[in-house]
Image: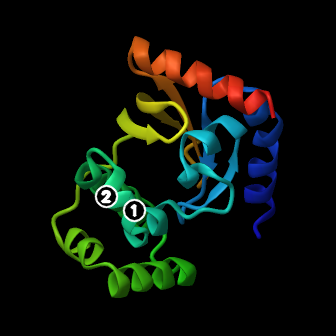
Amino acid sequence: MNHHVETTALSFSSYIAAVASPVLVFDRHLDVVDANDLAGAVSASFRIGTNLARFTFLNQMVEETTADWQRESRRTVALLRDFLGRSNDDQRFRELLGELMAQSETFAELWGRAADEPETYGTSSFTNPLVGAMRLGYEHFHQPDDDHVVMLWVPADRVSAQRLDRLRDMVTDR
């Protein structure tokens, strides 16, 4: 692993744990490399070690349980395409793309379409088994020469804020 990349990921860890909102860090392959407990409680996709693209396209439950899965899938493809455009010679990237193309017709179809611009902010809906539906806004933060993205989530409405507070209480009571 590149020392700069390793140092960058490790430097986030103490801050990530201290943030009161769901927050995660993912790398150029969309692997979650760090996340606080609340992020993991919001969605299993936000747990350390999860690949966001595999989770989106290879887990059938995601398509069935995500309110706007088509939009989320397009966002994921746009992020992957953006990172690939920065370095075409990444063998791991090619392997990930091959796996997704072979195992997901939807991914292959979306990858073959014209490129969307990656969204670095917006809202997503989550159905959490413990607290119910939540709408959360997100924003990506990253340094230009770094392949790590910090993704911070905040409630998009009052009901979602109340449900996120309940979920936070459950996570901190563990």
- Label 1 secondary element: helix
Q: Are marks 1 and 2 in contact (CB under 8 Å)?
A: yes
Query: Label 1 to label 2, Cα distance in Å?
Result: 5 Å
Q: Residue at x 57, y 52 (%)?
A: 44
What residue type is disc 2 on?
Glu
Tag of residue 64: 2
Does residue 58 appear left or right of residue 117 in this picture? right
Q: Position of residue 41 (x, y in %)?
A: 62, 41
Q: Position of residue 107 (x, y in %)?
A: 29, 72
Most extreme residue toward the top, as rendered? 158
Q: Residues within 10 Å of mark 2 (few under 14, many from 20)?
A: few
What residue type is disc 1 on?
Met
Q: Residue at x 34, y 42 (%)?
A: 119
**Residue 37 vertical placement versus 116 (above, below):** above
Q: Position of residue 58 (x, y in %)?
A: 42, 72
Tag of residue 61: 1
